Amino acid sequence: SSEGLIEGHVGRGTLVKRSSLQIDDDYFEQATPSWLLGLSASEDALLGPDARFLSEISSMEERQEIISLAQGTPPPDMLPAEVIQSLMANNLANARQSALGYCPMDGLLSLRRGIAARMRQRGVQVDVQNILILSGSTQGLGLIGRFLLTPGDEVVVEVPTYLGAIQMFRALGARIIGIPTDNEGMRVDLLEAILARRQPRFIYTLPTFQNPTGAVMSLARRRRLLQLARRYQVPIVEDDAYGEIYFGDKAPEPLKALDTYGNVLYLSTYSKMLAPGLRVAWLTAPVPMIERLSLYKQTFDLNTNAIGQWIISEMIRRNLLDEHLQLARQCYQQKLALMLEAIETYWPAGGRVHPPTGGMHLWYRLPGDMRARHLLREAVHEQVAFVMGELFHVDGGGHHYLRLSFAAPEEKHITEGIRRIGIAMRRLLAR
Ligand code: PMP
């Protein structure tokens, strides 16, 4: 009362005075809290101008009228719904504790065992204690990044490279050094000069079916990369999201298989092999690293969702994962052939493409000086989308490239999508 905030009225009680309510009125008239208004500026500073692009690609999937050749994910008909349904109907009740309880923080033991055995089949000499289950390999990139980097540190990546990794390392305040790539992967010959002069905290590479180029690093370069990393004592982060989606007769060996020194931190995921919605991935690394990151991981999610781990562990145990992978490889290889054929039919001459031998993406060099950004603008009028090459470049390049995903779209949409991009290309060329 002495501060003038309330007043008493005989018979009506004590009321808050109008003048003090005034402040609240103004406050409620403001449509958005002020701390929320400040967010977009700090987010752009943290993540960079293209930060929203990934989420825009994902939401495009929900717009039925647009044919999206942008997303690298399994198509709906390859998501193993029936297998999961049957596992749940027949086995979940007996496995309720492992599938629905909290699980060990380094992951379900049965899954770690299954993964270790599969890695040994691919030439990587590891045991279960070398495996840490992750909530997506994105979590792995984040954990490794936070563990090894302080803001201002340098990281080596390939040019081009996976957009999500660029965003992650930027968000953690890293300065990114790009090494060019060609059809045999990273130009390792250009790496030594960098390692000799600077001290990057790690080298991030996608040696097998690179995203976005689809390239496979040659054996000679793999050996040289391991040698250099050892000489300069720099760890390598190998991202092998697509390694098991190969179209040849034999599974390619991971870089990790050649790593007798324990210098490679290997990441892979079930997002491409099975279903991104499961959010299950893993890290293979030397035991001290697994132990540290496992403790650190706890502070983010306590443990990876158990039911996803249980499903995958059962699929491995019952040989269902291999059956599924065989179908997926056939399906994606067929779709790739269809996409190449459509490009041949509908696109003007002058572009360049190196058909990948696995993975989900086709990397295309547009004819002449045509820019992917201009083409995308035209393509969206034709209701079709792809990803501009520049988003994968940390050196400001890539303007004449685009990435097409052949795995996710339906077959009829591959042909139609390519036909529509062809229309957009001819319109640009006619200008
Ligand atoms: N690495 C690469 C190379 C990828 O392409 C992707 C998914 N686009 C990821 C990591 C992230 O996968 P996850 O769903 O396991 O987080």
Image (cartoon, grey):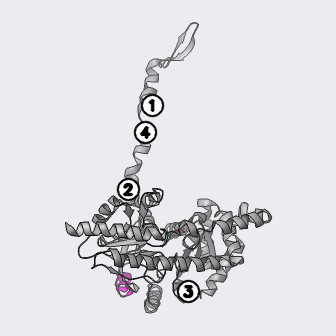
Q: Position of residue 8 (x, y in %)?
A: 54, 12
Q: Are marks 4 and 1 in contact (CB under 8 Å)?
A: no
In the rendered image, the vertical position of residue 324 relative to residue 303, given as above or below: below
Q: Amino acid at mark 2?
A: Asp
- In the picture, measured across the screen, residue 302 lies left or right of residue 237, that is right
Numbered tag placed on residue 251 in the rendering:
3
Q: Residues within 10 Å of mark 2 (few under 14, many from 20)?
A: some
**From this viewpoint, is residue 90 visible?**
yes
Q: Does any atom of ligand 1 lie closer than 8 Å to the CB of label 3?
A: no
Decide which of 209, 48 is in the foreground and name it: 209
Q: Position of residue 384 (x, y in %)?
A: 38, 63
Numbered tag placed on residue 44 in the rendering:
2
Real-space CA distance between mark 4 and mark 3, rounded to the nearest whole angstrom = 53 Å
Q: Earlier in the sequence, mark 2 or mark 4?
A: 4
Real-space CA distance between mark 2 and mark 4, rounded to the nearest whole angstrom = 19 Å
Q: Position of residue 364 (x, y in %)?
A: 35, 76
Q: Which residue is mark 1?
A: 28
Q: Are marks 2 and 4 in contact (CB under 8 Å)?
A: no
**Of marks 3 and 1, the one in the foreground:** 3
Magenta stretch bounds: 187-198
Q: Residues within 10 Å of mark 4 (few under 14, many from 20)?
A: few
Q: Residues within 10 Å of mark 1 (few under 14, many from 20)?
A: few
Q: Does any atom of ligand 1 lie closer than 8 Å to the CB of label 1?
A: no
Q: Earlier in the sequence, mark 3 or mark 1?
A: 1
Q: Which residue is mark 4?
A: 32
Decide which of 275, 201 is in the foreground and name it: 275
Residue at the extreme right = 94
Q: Amino acid at mark 3?
A: Ala
User: Disc 3 on helix, strand or loop?
Assistant: loop
Residue at point 41%, 54% (across, down):
43
Residue at the extreme bottom = 220
Real-space CA distance between mark 2 and mark 3, rounded to the nearest whole angstrom = 40 Å
